[in-house]
Image: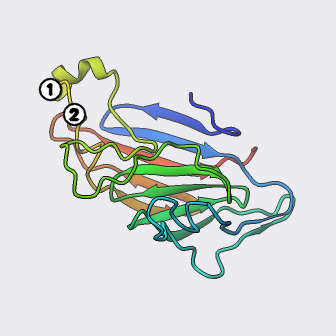
Amino acid sequence: MRHFSRRFRIRVKVRTLALHTIALTSCTGAVKAQPQAGSPLSGSPLSGRPWGNVPSGSSLLCLDGECQPAISKVIFFDRPAYRLTDGRTEAIIVPEIGRIMSYGKVGGPNLLWNAPTTKGVDWGWKNYGGDKNWLAPQSDWPVTQGKGWPPDTAFDGQPHQIEVLSGGKLQLTSPLSANTGMRFVRTLYYADNG
């Protein structure tokens, strides 16, 4: 189990559909979510170009017991992405690379490492940073995928399908792995009990 600023649970179940459920903390108290200077959604310190833009009307006002998670489409590092927020924290999911690229307090720093921009550089496998799924243990990769490195591209690097589910949930589904016959399905949501 991994822990971030508050409760950020990750549960993995493996076989034909591997379930990776992330329960983010729920909202309590009055909070207004708006991107602030220096946040990934307001501008990039690396390039001066926007990492993402939040559509107008996407701010969220949460009152005790009334907060519902909000999902909006954004741009993150020039890629289409989804923003899942409870008004206090936010996660940015980039289906094109199958990763959660940002998690932290709204307007605060990203708690997930992101690789510096490497445009025009191709080293084969690309480590974008963020949160990703790999089949574990890695020591079994020579058996499960016929090589020890790089990771199976179906799980890391290929576009994933994303679906907005009811109740403020996002579902991220990897392609089917030619090596293992498996795929990862991750459901991301804010936990009811914070």
Q: Is residue 17 above or below residue 119?
A: above
In the picture, measured across the screen, residue 28 lies left or right of residue 5, that is right
- Residue 126 drawn at (x, y percent): 28, 45
- Residue 160 drawn at (x, y percent): 32, 55
Return the mark for residue 25.
none
Q: Which residue is mark 1?
A: 147
In the rendered structure, which amino acid carries the disc numbered 1? Lys
- Residue 179 placement: quadrant: top left
Residue at 33% x, 21% y is 137
SS state under label 2:
loop
In the rendered structure, which amino acid carries the disc numbered 2? Pro
In the picture, measured across the screen, residue 129 lies left or right of residue 44, that is left
Q: Which residue is mark 2?
A: 150
Residue at 46% x, 40% y is 20
Residue at 38% x, 38% y is 133
Q: Residues within 10 Å of mark 1 (few under 14, many from 20)?
A: few
**Foreground: 142 or 178?**
142
SS state under label 1:
loop
Residue farthest along the top direction in this orientation: 139
